[in-house]
């Protein structure tokens, strides 16, 4: 056995090919430095991510780590121990784009995406906001009055301390009036950051949000008080958000008296969104794009449009979708993501707006336990969402409803045996009763839908089917008894990755999953993994055990990062 192998067997660092690499300089303790020889000490040193480390060559093929002291680089470096390399500090503040954190008032470049129906709840957004992380309240699917209650609570808890928060703004092609009412609420209540999602093109409300209140300050800079972080999975849509607001919509806003002509002129010089989250394969609405292919394309678009428009403030791209383990977070930052966005893992946390039964289902999820199913909001367009497969039949049932929608033009056309099955198993009531409930809902929310359904039987069929899909997520959030097989739980493959990583740690039990704890662990893990990669790039073999970054308690992490 060679001596490098011996070092590895003892769990410590070793040189990949002993003697092959020339030292880059010399290191001396100078009375103050420390050297870490054994595996535990080395693992500890790598976790103190704020400290610069030196890699020291050992004649037996092993490698030690050192911190403090003094190093001289270069071939003729004089006295001291031979040093093979350097591991720069990687404080959590070094992950992502520092301007993103500064502009949004964040401690770290970490964002929790909106989760509809208040699944990203007030409690979740407040907890993350207090920790200096940006969380978007899940306003989608909620009545404006309910969203306003959330604004009240979140602002009363976070505004005073200047903590960050934002609200989700979902494109609602079926309910344009609701989208506008949501924007008016945000403007009226001074919600300064919105996560715009599910847009296929720009709408008047989202443009109104972005350009309202725009002005030129005393230094001549254009200031848009409202920031949009657009979450997008297609380049065409990203192009629209990285471009200035469209002229026709600006004219419309001037005509409506929402902005002045001067403001419309200023708006030509800003992008609709300075920040775009490239959303890869995620929970909920997703095109299932692979992050590795997607992020470079979005970054190339960013650079092209920055050059084309010459914006005063640089465009940025973050990455969401599939981040459930520190390796994924490290990869996102290594690829150049300005920030990371998580979703699925937050739903599994104690602060989320779902019920404990769903949290337990999520905790059981493995990598492949997710599947695409028809979306309630864009059902007729064939849009799909990613949901949990294990423990519920929602995806199968939703798919069946979509097939029937394609096949038949009215509820009455559906053959009797099929109808009987749907009424018994899916709706648990006759179609007439299901329509009565649906009609009642839309009379409150958007009466034009009822008028249309009464003229057009296919639209009536669609509304009834959509009511099943829509209620399926409410049943899941409430933990409705007798409806477990219909629970619609939005979830992506990140959940399985998280569960695998959390096994055997304090993050494994449902009650141990706290959003700030999860966020800090992902970021801290990413920092340690970044340092491990720097070691490897300098010809050092990292033994398997040391390469594992297990979840740690918040107290441990804070001690390591020196908070
Ligand atoms: C339960 C759930 C509900 C979601 N609802 C919304 C939503 O209403 N609006 C939105 O912009 N994104 C929504 N998302 C997407 C998340 O905000 C986030 O972008 C995504 O979950 C990140 O990918 P991941 O699930 O792989 O972590 C939802 C995700 C989940 C898991």
Image (cartoon, rainbow, N blue to C red):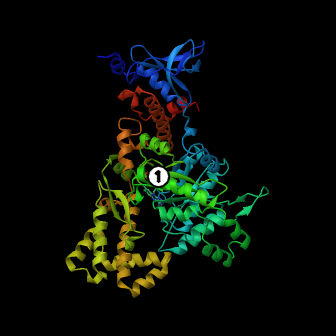
Residue 147 placement: quadrant:
bottom right
Residue 332 picture location, percent across and down: 47, 45
Asked if 472 appears above or below 74 in the picture, the reply is below
Image coordinates for residue 158, horizontal then vertical, percent: 62, 50
Q: Residue at x 43, y 19 (%)?
A: 63
* Relative side of 510 to 394, left or right: right
Q: Is residue 375 visible?
A: yes
| Residue furthest left as drawn | 417
Q: Quadrant of ligand 1?
A: bottom left
Q: Name above or below for residue 141 compared with residue 460.
A: above
In the figure, 508 relative to 148: above or below?
above
The x and y percentages for residue 286 are 41, 60
Residue designated by label 1:
295
Please name whichever residue, 185 or 430, is drawn nearer the observer in this view of the structure.
Answer: 185
* Front residue of this view, candidates 389 and 253: 253
- Badge 1: residue crowd in 10 Å (few <14, some 14–19, many ≥20): many
> SS of the residue at dot 1?
helix
Please state the horizontal and vertical placement of residue 267, each as a whole percent of the image.
67, 66
Which residue in the rendered view is the most extreme toward the right? Answer: 218
Drawn side of residue 324 relative to residue 203, left or right: left
- Can you name the residue that lies furthest to the bottom here? 455
The image quarter containing residue 207 is bottom right
Number of residue marks: 1
Quadrant assignment for the C terminus: top right
Residue 140 visible in this rendered orientation of the protein:
no
The quarter holding residue 454 reads bottom left
């Amino acid at each position: 056995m060679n001596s490098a192998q011996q070092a590895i067997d003892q769990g410590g660092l070793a040189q990949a090919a002993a003697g092959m690499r020339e030292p880059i300089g010399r290191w001396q303790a100078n009375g103050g430095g420390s050297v870490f020889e054994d595996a535990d000490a080395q693992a500890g040193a790598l976790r103190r991510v704020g400290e610069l480390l030196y890699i020291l060559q050992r004649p037996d093929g092993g490698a030690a780590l050192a911190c403090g002291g003094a190093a001289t680089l270069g071939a003729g470096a004089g006295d001291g121990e031979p040093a093979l390399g350097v591991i720069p500090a990687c404080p959590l503040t070094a992950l992502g784009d520092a301007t993103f954190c500064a502009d949004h008032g964040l401690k770290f470049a970490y964002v929790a995406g909106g989760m509809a129906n208040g699944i990203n709840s007030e409690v979740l957004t407040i907890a993350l906001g207090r920790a200096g992380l940006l969380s978007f309240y899940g306003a989608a699917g909620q009545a404006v009055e309910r969203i306003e209650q959330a604004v009240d609570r979140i602002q009363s808890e976070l505004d005073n301390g200047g903590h960050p928060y934002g609200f989700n703004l979902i494109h609602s092609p079926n309910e344009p009036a609701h989208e506008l009412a949501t924007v008016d609420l945000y403007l009226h209540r001074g919600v300064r950051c919105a996560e715009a999602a599910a847009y296929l093109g720009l709408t008047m409300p989202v443009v109104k949000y972005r350009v309202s209140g725009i002005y030129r300050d005393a230094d001549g800079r254009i200031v848009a008080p409202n920031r949009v972080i657009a979450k997008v999975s297609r380049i065409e849509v990203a192009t629209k958000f990285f471009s200035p607001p469209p002229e026709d919509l600006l004219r419309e806003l001037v005509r409506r008296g929402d902005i002045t002509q001067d403001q419309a002129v200023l708006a030509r010089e800003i992008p609709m969104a300075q920040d775009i989250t490239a959303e890869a394969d995620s929970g909920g609405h997703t095109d299932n794009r692979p992050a590795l292919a997607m992020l470079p394309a979005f970054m190339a678009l960013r650079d092209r449009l920055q050059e084309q428009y010459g914006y005063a403030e640089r465009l940025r791209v973050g990455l969401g979708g599939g981040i459930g383990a520190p390796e994924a977070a490290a990869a996102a930052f290594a690829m150049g993501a300005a920030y990371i966005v998580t979703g699925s893992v937050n739903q599994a946390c104690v602060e989320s707006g779902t019920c404990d039964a769903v949290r337990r289902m999520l905790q059981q999820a493995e990598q492949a336990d997710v599947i695409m199913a028809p979306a309630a909001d864009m059902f007729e367009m064939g849009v799909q969402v990613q949901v949990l497969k294990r423990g519920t039949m929602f995806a199968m049932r939703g798919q069946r409803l979509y097939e029937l929608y394609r096949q038949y033009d009215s509820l009455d056309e559906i053959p009797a045996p099929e109808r009987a099955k749907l009424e018994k198993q899916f709706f648990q009531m006759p179609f007439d009763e299901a329509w009565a409930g649906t009609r009642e809902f839309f009379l409150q929310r958007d009466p034009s839908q009822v008028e249309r359904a009464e003229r057009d039987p296919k639209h009536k069929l669609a509304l009834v089917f959509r009511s099943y899909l829509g209620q399926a997520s409410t049943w899941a959030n409430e933990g409705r008894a007798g409806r477990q097989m219909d629970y619609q739980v939005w979830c992506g493959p990140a959940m399985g990755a998280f569960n695998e990583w959390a096994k055997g740690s304090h993050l494994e039990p449902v009650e141990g999953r706290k959003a700030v704890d999860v966020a800090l662990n992902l970021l801290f893990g990413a920092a340690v993994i970044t340092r491990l990669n720097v070691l490897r790039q300098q010809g050092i073999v990292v033994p398997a055990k040391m390469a594992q970054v297990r979840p740690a308690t918040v107290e441990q992490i804070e001690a390591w990062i020196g908070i």
